[in-house]
Image (spheres, helix red, strand yellow):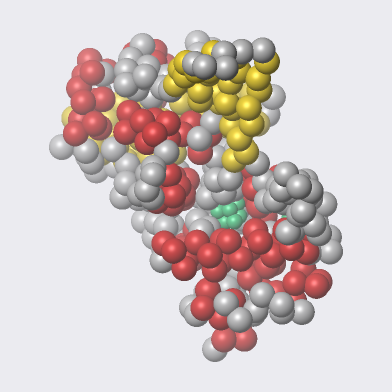
Amino acid sequence: MKKMIGLDKLPALWEQLSAEGPLYLPIEERGVVCFKPWYEGAVVRLDALNGVVPPKDIFLPREETYMRYQGGSQTLEIEAVSPGPDDKATLFGVHPCDLKAVEMLDRVYIDQEPGDSLYRRRRENATVVALACSSPDPFCFCNLFEVDPADAPGADIMAYLSEQSLYLETRTEKGETMLAKAESLISDAKDEPERPREVKTTDFGLYLEGLSDNLKERFDDPAWDNLYKSCLSCGVCTYVCPTCYCFDVEDFGHEGAGERFRCWDSCMFGHFTQMAGGHNPRPDRKERVRQRFLHKLQYYPQTYGEIACVGCGRCLRSCPVNLDIVQAVKALGGEAVEQR
Ligand code: SF4
Ligand code: SF4
């Protein structure tokens, strides 16, 4: 049975859900929409397209201490800092492309041995309410990666926004549990939700068939010599990309005690691959730009079977010099006209 809730009752729903654990919603602050924990008076923008930063930081925080230690020369006490099993978060309003991107991170952080316990705990504890997109913007091209903007198969609840109501379709036990807790605000849907059908995103004329295999032979392709030149090494493309997942680890210690800390890092930064002895295998922008695009288009697909892009359009919107994945694929021979 599908459920629905009037839009006027949503603030009460937010209040109720946030009492159970952190509730992340697309919240507008200073004109920018990002997933943030709900607070009273927050401007929730379920109608907004993808926020500037994807919700990956809920599972992989921008920075976190994950271990503290103290001791002397003979003993060492280690305290693991981790999200508790009761830290049950709800993500409400995640678009299908961003959820698919989280599933790509799952393969790296959960399916590999050893998995990442912090990431896994957060994923296992989270309930995800996905929200269908009905009007993508001109930068969205998720259709190319077989994402249906109106459906997210991995969601616990799939939501559809109409003028007066939000329709909720439960997909998992976690989703049912969540709705059961908000029973007083939610009713059975009498009619079918206005489910957006066949939502078309922009066709940039890309042709990806065989591209990953083809790139194996193109590490030294002359295309890289031109492609990288405009790059500013600002790292924005990696921070806003929902499928980028690199981090840096540092120890901050002082006499007898310290902590191990990790934070997002970017393969576009000069020091990203610098080793302790000073050697840097990717000293120039050309190597770094090549790494970013080969990772998405060749290395990730080689391991996991699909290109590490969901067509969210963030790198197209954010790169100050328009050096985005569409430009890269075109420069590397992935234009449909050339292939047909
Ligand atoms: S590709 Fe664009 S966004 Fe990425 S580091 Fe270079 S200039 Fe910055
Ligand atoms: S490469 Fe660009 S379009 Fe693809 S998922 Fe990352 S930010 Fe989105």
Which quadrant does ligand 2 occupy? bottom right
Residue at (59, 27) in percent of width and height: 261
Residue 284's place in the image compared with 131, above or below, is: below
Residue at (81, 59) in percent of width and height: 284
x and y percent of residue 231 in the render? 80, 57
Which residue is nearer to you in this view: 261 or 75?
A: 75
x and y percent of residue 287 in the render? 74, 63
Residue 23 in view = no
x and y percent of residue 338 in the render? 62, 86
Which residue is nearer to you in this view: 61 or 46?
A: 61
- Indicate the quadrant containing the C terminus: top left, top right, bottom left or bottom right: bottom right
- Left or right, 179 with reference to 310: left
- Indicate the quadrant containing the N terminus: top left, top right, bottom left or bottom right: top left
Residue 44's place in the image compared with 51, above or below, is: above
Residue 267's place in the image compared with 89, above or below, is: below
- Left or right, 17 with reference to 74: left
